[in-house]
Amino acid sequence: ITALSFDDNDVTSSWALIRRGTTGRVQTALEGTQVHLECSAVTSDPEVKVEWMLPDLSTVEEATDKVEISERGQLIISNASVSDSGLYHCIVRSKTAMDLMPLRLTVKERSLSPTALNGQNIMLKTGNSLSLPCEVTSAQPSQTLWYLPKNQVLLPTQKTRRAEVLENGTLVVRKMTQEDAGEYSCLASNLYGVDMLSHMVEVTGEKDVEKIKVQTDKEPLIFTNSFHQQKHFGKFLRSEYNILPKIF
């Protein structure tokens, strides 16, 4: 019989933990961009190893044209595509310890297909103001953001010269011009899934001071027990538990 033995110093001093926080654990990126998923370890072992598990449950063994792990433990995804969306896991190993943390990545198409436009077709005149509500309910910490035409991104309480996202998630765009026409998408995500509501806005005619407000009558998601089934926007990850974000 061979007995396994450990150096007492290794056992007592070798430990590893991943820094946790809501920031960065749910990320959204545009198709074609480079994505950096962070994984910061606190450890007593200078030889600690950082590994990454992809949504298909494979691990990153070596750098490829698509993915690589940086010296700091970041997972770098080049030329992100919609198929890269999913749940990633950072794994940190020391000599005698291991820690694991999930991260959700959602990659949005630069131009949505007609079937993904699940909101309304909106037409308003030049000079009007546009108000698009985005009410999100989520039992878990979630990230909500707006995608505007030309792939401009606005976070809650963020604003530009004419556009802003209010605290309740409503997007307001003042003095609309024809250049503001296009797709407007509210995207909400947490570690368990994604929901998105997308409208097509047309701007025509002469200036009118009337303010246009769009009422969204989107039906709530129907949850099934197929927790591991994931499809892209319009048919989202489902769960028998009410833990996914929902947009009303």
Image: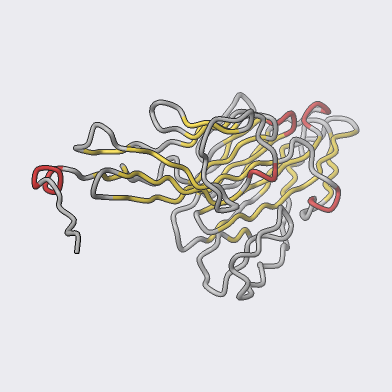
Q: Quick one: which residue is furthest to the front in this view? A: 1
**11 horizontally vs 193: left or right:** left
Residue 72 locus on image (x, y percent): 38, 28
Q: Nearer the viewer, residue 111 or 103?
A: 103
Q: Quadrant of residue 227?
A: bottom right
Residue 79 locus on image (x, y percent): 67, 30
Residue 2 locus on image (x, y percent): 19, 59
Q: Nearer the viewer, residue 234 or 102?
A: 102
Q: Quadrant of residue 238?
A: bottom right
Which residue corresponds to the image point at 46% horizontal and 49% vertical from the top-left? 89
Residue 186 locus on image (x, y percent): 65, 47
Q: Give the image's coloring scheme.
A: secondary structure
Which residue corresponds to the image point at 64% horizontal and 43% vertical from the top-left? 84
Q: Quadrant of residue 228?
A: bottom right
Which residue corresponds to the image point at 53% horizontal and 59% vertical from the top-left? 192
State which quarter of the image contains the C terminus: bottom right
In this picture, is 247 found above or below 132? below
